[in-house]
Image (cartoon, rainbow, N blue to C red):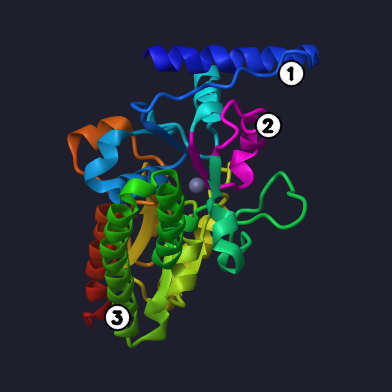
Amino acid sequence: MMRRMIKAAAAVTAAAVMLSGCMADAPVDIKKSDEEKISVVCTAFPEYDWVKQITGGRSYEFDITYLLANGADLHNYQPSTKDMAEISSCDLFICTGGESEKWVDDALAAPVNSKMKVIRLLDVAGDRKEAEEEKEGMEPEEEEEEGVVYDEHVWLSLKNADLFCAEITDCLCEMDEAHSDEYRDNYEKYSVELKKLDMDFQDMFDAVEDPAKKTMVFADRFPFLYFVKDYGLDYYAAFKGCSAESEASFKTVAFLAEKLDELGLKSVYVIEGSDGKLAKAVLENSSDKDRDIVMLNSLQSVTKDELKSSSMTYLSLMQSNYRKIKDALEKEAVEE
Ligand SMILES: [Zn+2]
């Protein structure tokens, strides 16, 4: 608690110096005692979970903050003064580095901790990053974006997740060399699990014989771009990425209904938090109202309460997505 106050005070001092433009007083440099925990601040849930997985039994020696823990959406989140103070004084800051996190530049403009390490997932993804797509049938965006906008939901690729975890491991090992063997060991084991689930998904989709069934129709927003790209799937969706649009026109509803009929699909997908209204409207307008509505979790709105009441992890949520898609594909395979 005391430390938090010191941090906040230091950030206020730094901000005051910046505002007054007075360069005579340099920001207070906080000296850390040996007992102090290494502080890690993460924006999204997957980042937070990965740090916990890699620090493993030593996670108690870290102060790991998950900024979106109160259910704020990645795309609407704005850091509080307290969050800003925490970010500017942390040892490791992990963010997606995308369109919705433009506030990050301000937060990092005057770091109190000059040795801070920063991981931007989109930078780590490098050539693997994907530009948002405006796919046929999608509701057009009202605001035209300039230039290429990269899809921020980079964690929905298990291959990316492995890259990100390797990067996080490198950073943690540099910050706490004494325990680097342990962190590398934790990463190796975790990486095996990520690769296994990735293979399971690949095998599952490879086993689908009818190419039409390798299409996912989302009567919702579409954060699963990296996922479908990984497994060579096709998709249709009402809105791209996590578009701010929420009203679908009849044209979009009719388009998705027609795709379900044309491809002969028995399931339509939605993402966590959906009220299912759009999906129901799509089904009403298709030839078969009794299709399943399957809810996948895109891991972008996991709350602290959910974490308390269950042992949700990145892997457990991705495994749950696997089971839901597997069930849906098994139904697809049954001839009527
Ligand atoms: Zn999103």
Report whether 302 appears left or right of 67: left
Q: Which of the 4 image quadrants contains residue 20?
A: top right
Answer yes or no: do the residues labelled 2 and 1 have beta carbons within 8 Å?
Answer: yes
Residue in the foreground of this view, choosing between 223 and 135: 223
* Residue 292 sits in quarter: bottom left
Q: Is ligand 1 closer than 8 angstroms to the Cβ of mark 3?
A: no
Q: Which residues are magenta?
A: 91-116
- Residue picked out by circle 3: 203
Which residue is located at x 37 percent, y 26 percent? Answer: 36
Q: Position of residue 132 (x, y in %)?
A: 61, 59
Front label number (1 vs 3) = 1
The residue sitting at the bottom extreme is 209
Is residue 107 shown left or right of residue 273? right
- 137 versus 275 height, above or below: below
User: What residue is drawn where x is 61% and y is 17%?
Assistant: 28
Residue 293, visible in the rendered structure:
no
Instruction: Confirm if mark 2 falls within 8 A of ligand 1.
Output: no
> Distance between the Cα atoms at labels 1 and 3?
55 Å
In this rendering, is residue 95 above or below 261? above
Q: Is residue 190 visible?
A: yes
Which residue is under mark 1?
18
In screen coordinates, is 290 left or right of 300?
Answer: left
Q: Amino acid at mark 1?
A: Met
Tell me the quadrant of the picture where the N terminus can be found. Answer: top left
Helix, strand or loop at label 1? It is: helix
Query: What amino acid is at disc 2?
Result: Ala
For the residues labelled 2 and 1, the Cα–Cα distance comes to 10 Å
Q: Residue at x 45, y 49 (%)?
A: 174
Residue 44 placement (x, y as % from top left): 44, 42
Q: Which residue is mark 2?
A: 109
